[in-house]
């Protein structure tokens, strides 16, 4: 455990990673500020020293993971012409399900204050599902220009279907739900393969 008064490097990420481990291992009901700090092996008050309460922590965790996936989606444009279209899309979409994504989404939805914070941040321009959808649309348009995606495919519709399905699976999945990754892989393949 870090001694009192000693700076803890990368504390946000350390706490976020600890929260993901708790959720993956024990489910969203086990996530508390105490379980997070215990998992991160840091002082109990550290979470509250860096976040305006537990709901703020949960909201920031979800927003951080959305931003990471959005950044990954924006990098798709650099992959046009490389690998396969389905595999490139899978890498982005399946990232939403990493680190207990469904459980974290469920946790955020169960905490009204966290949900409000997330909604306000997204409405204010924080990257989320819309940014991911726009990046997928742009990537598919690039692949169409290269002839790797059929001209008959509407990139906007495919992006909406992929992101909408991922959103649905995240919001309705629970600890006992089947792994959503195979469904997403089949959907992506059905939508983009020639």
Image (tube, rainbow, N blue to C red):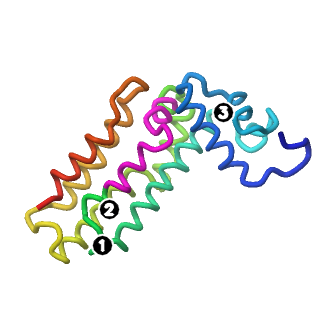
N-terminal label among 2 and 1 = 1
Numbered disc total: 3
**Circle 2 crowding by C-alpha within 10 Å: few under 14, some 14–19, many from 20:** some
Q: Looking at the image, which is closer to me, 164 or 38? A: 38
- Tags 2 and 1 touching, CB below 8 Å: yes
Q: Position of residue 125 (x, y in %)?
A: 48, 56
Q: Residue at x 57, y 38 (%)?
A: 20
N-terminal label among 2 and 3 = 3
The CA distance from mark 2 to mark 1 is: 8 Å
Give the dominant element type of the magenta stretch: helix, strand or loop: helix
**Circle 3 crowding by C-alpha within 10 Å: few under 14, some 14–19, many from 20:** some
Q: Residue at x 26, y 49 (%)?
A: 162
Disc 1: which residue: 82
**Circle 1 crowding by C-alpha within 10 Å: few under 14, some 14–19, many from 20:** few
Provide the residue span drawn in magenta.
Answer: 90-107
Q: Position of residue 10 (x, y in %)?
A: 72, 54
Q: Residue 54, which numbered label? A: 3
Q: Report the quarter where the N terminus lies.
A: top right
N-terminal label among 1 and 3 = 3
Q: Position of residue 164 (x, y in %)?
A: 28, 44
Disc 2: which residue: 88
Secondary structure under tag 2 reads helix
Q: Residue at x 16, y 53 (%)?
A: 191
Residue 23 drawn above or below residue 85:
above
The CA distance from mark 1 to mark 3 is: 42 Å
């Amino acid at each position: 455990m870090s001694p009192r008064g000693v700076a803890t490097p990368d504390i946000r990420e350390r706490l976020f990673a600890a929260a993901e481990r708790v959720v993956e291992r024990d489910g969203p009901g086990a996530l508390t500020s105490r379980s997070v700090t215990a998992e991160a092996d840091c002082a109990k008050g550290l979470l509250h020293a860096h976040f305006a309460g537990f709901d703020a922590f949960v909201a920031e965790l979800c927003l951080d993971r959305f931003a990471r996936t959005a950044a990954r989606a924006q990098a798709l444009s650099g992959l046009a012409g490389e690998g396969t279209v389905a595999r490139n899309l899978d890498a982005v979409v399946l990232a939403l399900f990493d680190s207990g994504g469904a459980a974290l989404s469920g946790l955020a939805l169960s905490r009204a204050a966290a949900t409000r914070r997330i909604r306000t941040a997204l409405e204010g321009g924080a990257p989320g599902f819309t940014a991911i959808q726009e990046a997928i649309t742009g990537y598919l348009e690039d692949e169409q220009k290269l002839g790797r995606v059929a001209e008959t495919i509407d990139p906007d519709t495919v992006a909406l279907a992929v992101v909408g399905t991922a959103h649905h699976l995240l919001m309705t999945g629970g600890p006992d739900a089947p792994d959503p990754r195979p469904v997403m892989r089949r959907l992506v393949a059905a939508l983009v393969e020639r």
